Amino acid sequence: MEIVIYKAKKYLGILLLMVLAISVIYPLAWTVVSSIREPTDFFQDPWGLPDEFDFSVYGKVWTEFNVKYALLNSFKLSTITVCVSLIFTLTASFAISRMRWRYSNVVLAFFLAGLMIPGHSTIIPLYLSLLPIIEVIGPKNTLLIPYIAGTLPISIFIICNYMQSIPASLEEAAVIDGCNVFQLFYKIIVPVSLPAVATVTIFNFLGVWNELMLGLVFLTRNVDQTLPLAMLRFSGRFGTQWSETLATVSIAVIPSVLLYLLLQEKLIKGMTAGSVKG
Amino acid sequence: MDKMLSNKLVILLFIAPALCLYALVVPYPLLKSIQYSFYQWNIVGVPKYVGLKNYIRLFTSDYVFVTALKNTALFTIGSIITQIPLAFILAVSLAKPTRLNKFFKSVYFIPCTISGAAVSLLWQFIYHPNMGILNSALNAIGLGSWTKTWLAEPKFALWAVVFSMAWQWFGYHMVIFITAMTSISPEIFEAAEVDGATGWKKIWYISYPLMKPFIKVSMILITTSSIKAFDNIYVLTGGGPANSSTVLALHMYNRAFRQLQFGYGAAIAVVLLVLCVVLTISLNKLFGTKNVDY
C-alpha cells in the first residue's frame, strides 16, 4: 500500500511539473507557429493548430517595416559590445588579479559597486552629456558607450574570480620560459581563462540583445532601432497588428533560445554569477 | 618576476581604459543625477537651482509618484509571493540531477533568456479580451463570468504584469535554489533520516535553514529588480489604465524623456537609487548574516 501511495505521489509530481513545462513552452512555440499562419485563419482561431503555413508576413516586416535593419543593428551592437567589453575586462582583470600593486582591491571594489547602481539612476545625465557625441558619431555608435560600460562590473567580477584561481606556478613557468608581461597575458592567462570568457560573452550578448530602456532613449529613428524596439512598432492606439508583431518577436526570440540551448550551462552561470557567489 | 608584475606603467596601461570608461559612465552620472535633482531643468532654458523643491513636489503634490511608489511596493510583494515559494518547491523536487529533472530545469529557465519586451507582447495576447487564451480557457471551463479585459481594468492591470513577470523569472530563482540544494552535503540528510526525519521535516529543518542565505539573495534580487522594473510595464500596460499600474522607473522615464523635465526626473532617479540601496541593506540585516552550519 505504501508503495502505491509513493508511486502515485511521484507520478502526480511529474504530471504537475509537466503541466508547468507545457505552460512555459506552449506560448513560445505558439508565437513562432502563429507568425507563419495565414492571418485570417489565425484570427478565426488564434490558439488552434494551423491548416497551412504562410511566410508572407516575414517578407512584409523584413522590407516594409525595416526589421532587417533591427536585426542587423541588434547583432552589431551586441557583437561590438561583447568584443570591446572583453578587451577592457580582460586587461583590467589581469591587472587587478595577477599584478601586484597597492590599490588593486580598492579598484576592484569600485568596479563591484557598479553592481548595486541601477542604470536608471544614471540615464538622465548620461543622455544629456552624450547628446553632443550623438551628433558626431550617430546614436547607434553612441549607445555603445553605456552598453560597454554597463557590462564591466559583472564581467570584471566573473573574470577576476576566475583569474585569481589560476595557480602561480603556471605564471612562474611561463616567466622562466622567457615570457614578458604581455606574453604572459595573452599567451597564458587569457587562454586559461576561456571558460569564464565564454560565460561573460554569452551573458553580455543576450544582455544587449534584450535591452530596451537605453534603446528607447537613444534610438529614435526607425532605421537605428534594435529588435526589442522594432517589436513595438505594430502596436498603437488603434490596436496591434498581431501577425507582424509575432513575426518580429520570433525573429528576436529564436536566436536567444538557440543560444541558450547550445550554451546552457555557461549562460546560467553568467546570469546567476552575481547572486550565488556574491 | 615580482618586478615584472609590479611595473606601474603596465598596470596603468591595463587598468586605465576600463577604469576611465566605467568611472565616466556609471559613478559620474550618478553624482550628476543627485546634482540635477536640485535643479528645475527643461531642455530649453537654463537649469535653475530650486533646492529641495523637486523632492517636496514629489511627495506632496505628485499623485502619480505616490501611486508609483505604492505600486512598486505591491509589485515587489506580489513578485516575492508568486516566485519564491514556487521556485523553492521546484528546487526541492528537482534537486537530484536525474535526466528528467535536468530537462525540467532547462525548460523552466528558457523565459529568463528572452527580452522583457517579447515576453510582454506575448502576454498581451494571452490577456487579450476576445482572442486571449486566458479568457478562452475561463469560458471553456464554464467560468465565463470571470472573463475580464485584464489590462484595461485598474484593479487587475498591475497584477497581470506581476503574473507575467513570475512566468518569466520563477526559473531563475529555482536555479539559484538548486545550486544551494546541491551544496548541502547528502550526509546531513542521511543523518536526519537515521534520526527519523521524513519528507517535510527534512525540508523544514534542514533544507530551509541551510538555504536561507540564498532565499535572502533571491529576495534582494526581486526587490531591486521590482524597483527597477520598466520593460514589462512599459510594454504590457504603459502604466495604465489611468496610472493604475505605473511604477517609479516608468514615471521617471515619462517625466524626463517624454515631458523633458530632467531635474524632476533626476529626483525620481535618486529616490529609486536610495530605495535600492536602503532595501538591500535592510533585507541583509533582517535575514542576518549569520549562516547556519551543521
Image: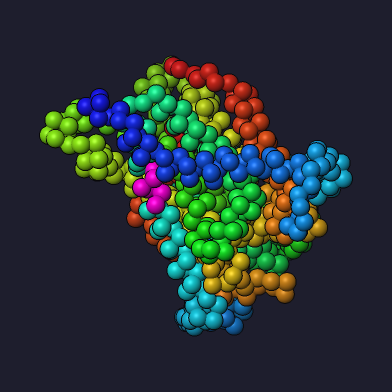
Asked whether, in this view, residue B110 is left or right of residue A266, the answer is right
Give the residue drawn at x 69%, y 39%: B34
Depth check, front residue: B248 or B182: B248
Image quarter of residue B144: bottom right
**Along the viewing direction, whichever of B234 and A219 lies nearer the viewer:** A219
Left or right: where B292 falls relative to B182:
right
Q: How many marks?
A: 0
Residue A87 location (% of width, % of height): 36, 47
Using the rendered image of the protein, determine whether residue A240 is visible from the camera's viewpoint. Answer: yes
Identify which residue, A13 or A47, lies in the foreground: A47
Residue bounds of the magenta highlight: A84-89
Q: Position of residue B26 (x, y in %)?
A: 55, 43
Q: Is residue B285 above or below residue A225?
A: above
Is the residue A131 above or below the residue A97 in the image? below
**Is residue A53 part of the magenta span, yes or no?**
no
Looking at the rendered image, the quarter that the N terminus of chain A falls into is: top left
B140 horizontally vs A30: left or right? right
The percent coordinates of residue B63 (x first, y second) are: 84, 48
For the stretch drawn in magenta, the main secondary structure is helix
Between B147 and B169, the one lying in front of the other is B169
At horizontal 65% and vertical 70% (from top left) the residue drawn is A235
Q: x, y percentage for residue B179?
A: 42, 35
Q: Is residue B57 left or right of residue B164?
A: right
